[in-house]
Image (cartoon, grey):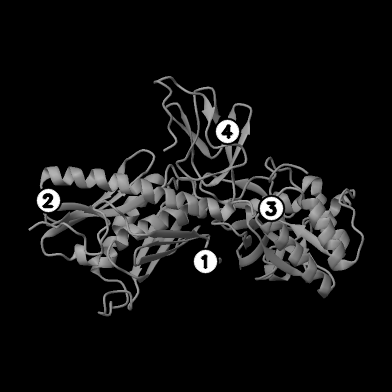
Amino acid sequence: MQRRNNGGKMTEEIITKDKEIAVPGEIIATGMSFLPGKGAYRESDKIVAQRLGMVSVEGKVIKLIPLSGRYLPKLKDRVIGRVIDVLMTGWRLEVNSPYSAVMTLKDATSEFIPRGADLTQYYRLGDYVVCQVVNVTSQKLVDVSMKGPGLRKLRGGRIVEVTPQKVPRIIGKDGSMVSMVKQATNCNIVVGQNGLIWIDGEPENEVIAVKSVKKIEEEAHLSGLTDRMAEWLQKETGVKVNPAATPPPAEEQTTTEHPHHFGGSQ
Amino acid sequence: MTYDKRFDGRKIDELRPMSAKVGIIPRADGSAMFQIGKTVALCAVYGPRDLHPKFMQNPETGILRVNYNMMPFSGHGERVRPGGGRRSKEISMVMENALLPVLDLKEYPNAVVDIFVELPQTDAGTRCAAITAAAMALADAGLEMKDMVCAVAAGRVEDKIVVDLNYLEDSHEDGADVPVAVLPNSGKITLLQMDGEVTKEQMNEIIEKAKEACKKIYEVQKAALKEKFAKR
């Protein structure tokens, strides 16, 4: 398709430009001076897309930012899980991924749990918790822990599901986006890296918070989103929001530094 | 006898009109629709997800599971018996073989990627339409793929080599039908079947023409995938 022949000479050029969408197998660039990053591979002198994604050229490295796909547990990710089974020595959690996670007694609480105790008095089936991934094996056995600041059981509120790839955008730079929504709607919000979001507040405000999360998800690939969201939130809630507000106290912070932000910062 | 004019008036290597759309099923992880002439394929991809029954799990790699289904009212007047049959089982298997070479499921041990293809309306070339739709749905699901997969049926009707046979041509008494799946960027073939008889020379011509036709299908796939994620 986009192969060009300059009299048999090897050409060094980017065919699919930065921020454009590439489909699997598409040739992004030709020439040996480029390096394939995540989501791309080298085929002789060409850099080829290995997935559907947005092309990102950083110097010599060409990588693809995924736009869709399921969540795969990653070490130190803070996720929201649902208890799906009570085991002999812990709980099994569903974390919106192909693999379920296990939380052992030791990692569950700082309380002393006596031998043979009924584990459902701590967490029951269907409970939602915020936890952190502490181990992922090659066979994708996932261990999570609830020891750490802000890790807790979630009571009340509601759970919203978003595409996991859009999570960095929902959190925003240093948590700016989510703290803006919190400020405007006066809701408690916890964003899990696995695409589950917990929202708790006044019913009307919860609805607005859910709407704003969905709006961010839909427009994640557009730039200038923070300002647009500030305007939108102000219209919906009547609360004056400042897009440059300082992030709230660390306790509610859910930001995990993520290398790729959509469309960069505004 | 010579087959001078195609039944529907197409040129000898002309494809039926195509259209494609990605992301048609919100609950699926990836989905796509592909229409070529009167044949329509709807495809949903789920996963990678937990695989049950457990004995099917493979600790070395994730597996691909394809389900091809023609809806009861989709055929030519005759009701297609619902449920899996020998035919759909075979097509599911060849589809799996056609799509697996581009996928890398090593990252997902013990898991499964499920592909469901439903055909609400058919006019021959269903397995090819199904593969074309499935490749788009897999890309939409965000899975790592080396390349796309495009498929088309080429074949012989009397003395002519034609591409994208419709039902009349497919069921013609003197002819052959050869479905071909091609990886558009590398030109590799992942599906090649034949129903009928052709000579060696004719076979080569069929494969060449099918490869040419797949390039057009690839453009349709690419446009559909880019449209879903394009900036509005």
**Circles 4 and 3 on the same subunit:** yes
The answer for which chain carries disc 3 is: A
Q: Is residue B7 above or below residue B101?
A: below
Please indicate whether residue A11 sits to the left or right of residue B93 in the image: right
Name the secondary structure under disc 2. Answer: loop
**Which residue in the structure is indicated by mark 4?**
A62
- In 3D space, how far apart are the residues under numbered discs 4 and 3 (Cα atoms)? 21 Å
Residue at image mark 3: A220
Circle 4 crowding by C-alpha within 10 Å: few under 14, some 14–19, many from 20: many
* Image quarter in which the N terminus of chain B is found: bottom left
Under mark 3, the amino acid is Ala
Does A97 sit left or right of B188 as displayed? Answer: right
Q: Badge 2, how many Cα within 10 Å: few under 14, some, many 20+? A: some
Secondary structure beneath dot 4 equals strand
Q: CA distance from mark 4 to mark 2?
A: 46 Å
| Residue type for callout 4 | Ile
In the rendered image, residue B135, in percent from the top left (x then y), is placed at 42, 53
